[in-house]
Amino acid sequence: MRFLITGGAGFIGSAVIRHIIQNTEHEVLNVDKLTYAGNLESLSSISNYSRYQFSQTDICNRAALDQLFTDFQPDAVMHLAAESHVDRSISGPYAFIETNIIGTYQMLEASRAYWLGLNEKKKATFRFHHISTDEVYGDLEGTTDLFTEKTPYSPSSPYSASKASSDHLVRAWNRTYGLPILVTNCSNNYGPYHFPEKLIPLMILNALQGKALPVYGNGQQIRDWLFVEDHARALYTVVTQGQVGETYNIGGHNEKANIDVVLTICSLLEELAPNKPQGIERYRDLITYVKDRPGHDVRYAIDASKIERELGWTPKESFETGLRKTVEWYLNNNEWVEHVQSGEYQSWLNKQYQG
């Protein structure tokens, strides 16, 4: 098969591409604008494969998208391109409206035009897989409630509202135009190659540098944590085996309060990186409570029983095994971290893809 994957230089997108190239014989076209969080170094392990192509393209550029569809002739689209950082959406929501809503609209229209031109056999097997988040559901009041595929949408931030809007567009293109779509909503991802602005890599890297570990409010906000490589397997399972028109929630079965995540990272670093920055006795002493962010959801938790029941997917990693792998990866990949933090990976990009 040929997969056109948007946002493939991002955290989850790069994991999906590595999974497909390393474990199948399929071809991949990675379409990414390469904004600040897009990093082609995350794909260095597969970049020389003949089955992998990259195009630096803005998904809001319809003419460029049409040309990519014509040239590549995909069998499936996996749409991951999105602005995804809640804090950034609060301070600058426009980019989220543009990429997550307008960009998704352009992808849907380019996909529909391409799909309508296919022969009947290829038209029947084409898929548009939209990758979304559990944040569209808002937060859960009870301690035992779970998000299901039928949970009403109640987004709290500009980010989650923009993703909710894109979800509605995708389902509308199925209902109105018959475009064969699939939607997945996932819980919080973590793992190797995660951009350092997100909670887990930020805590790891700040601790190693002796910087403060900022925790919002009282740190009791609960998230369900999903190892990114488990998520990549799930997404491939859905796009190849899922039922058209269906939604599948993907979770890690790992509910943790933010403060407990930070404390666990500190404990792992005590073991794996005992030589601390000067003046630091314990990593946990770096924890600093800061003012909570506006509209902060209290609890997310995914009911992932549908994807397990219908498609046979379950996560392989527990939070403990996945977090240990993540901390070890950051300890062993200083060069990647330094390039991301310094912007040197942009120079690598220019050298790797001259012109």
Image: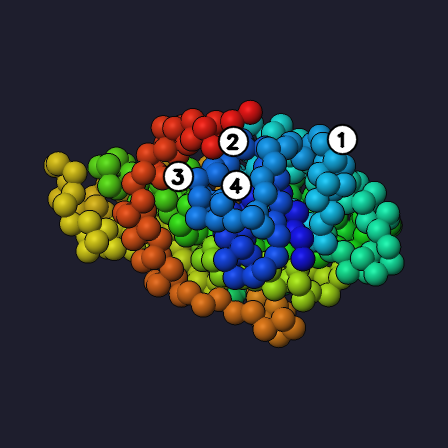
Taking the view exactly as shown, the residue that stands out farthest to the top is 355
Question: Of the residues under marks 3 and 4, which one precedes in the sequence?
Answer: 4
Q: Amino acid at mark 2?
A: Tyr
C-alpha separation, residue under disc 2 versus residue under disc 3: 24 Å
C-alpha separation, residue under disc 4 versus residue under disc 2: 14 Å
Residue placed under numbered mark 3 in the picture: 196
Residue visible at 77% across and 45% down in the picture? 111
Of badges 1 and 2, nearer the viewer stands 2
Q: Amino acid at mark 3?
A: Pro
Residue placed under numbered mark 4 in the picture: 9
C-alpha separation, residue under disc 4 versus residue under disc 1: 21 Å
Of badges 4 and 2, nearer the viewer stands 2
How far from the left and from the top, in percent, is residue 304?
57, 66
Q: Amino acid at mark 4?
A: Ala
Crowd tier of the residue under label 4, counting other residues whose Cα lies within 10 Å: few below 14, some 14–19, many 20 or above: many
Question: Of the residues under marks 1 and 3, which one precedes in the sequence?
Answer: 1
C-alpha separation, residue under disc 3 versus residue under disc 4: 15 Å
Q: Secondary structure at mark 2?
A: loop
C-alpha separation, residue under disc 1 versus residue under disc 2: 22 Å
The answer to which image quadrant residue 149 occupies is bottom right
How far from the left and from the top, in percent, is residue 230?
49, 61
Crowd tier of the residue under label 2, counting other residues whose Cα lies within 10 Å: few below 14, some 14–19, many 20 or above: few
Residue placed under numbered mark 1 in the picture: 63
Residue visible at 34% across and 38% down in the picture? 337
Residue placed under numbered mark 2 in the picture: 353
Q: Is 128 drawn above or below residue 42 in the view shown?
A: below
How far from the left and from the top, in percent, is residue 194?
43, 45
C-alpha separation, residue under disc 1 versus residue under disc 3: 33 Å
Near-viewer residue (295 or 319): 319
Q: Secondary structure at mark 3?
A: loop
Residue visible at 41% across and 52% down in the picture? 191
Q: Secondary structure at mark 4?
A: loop
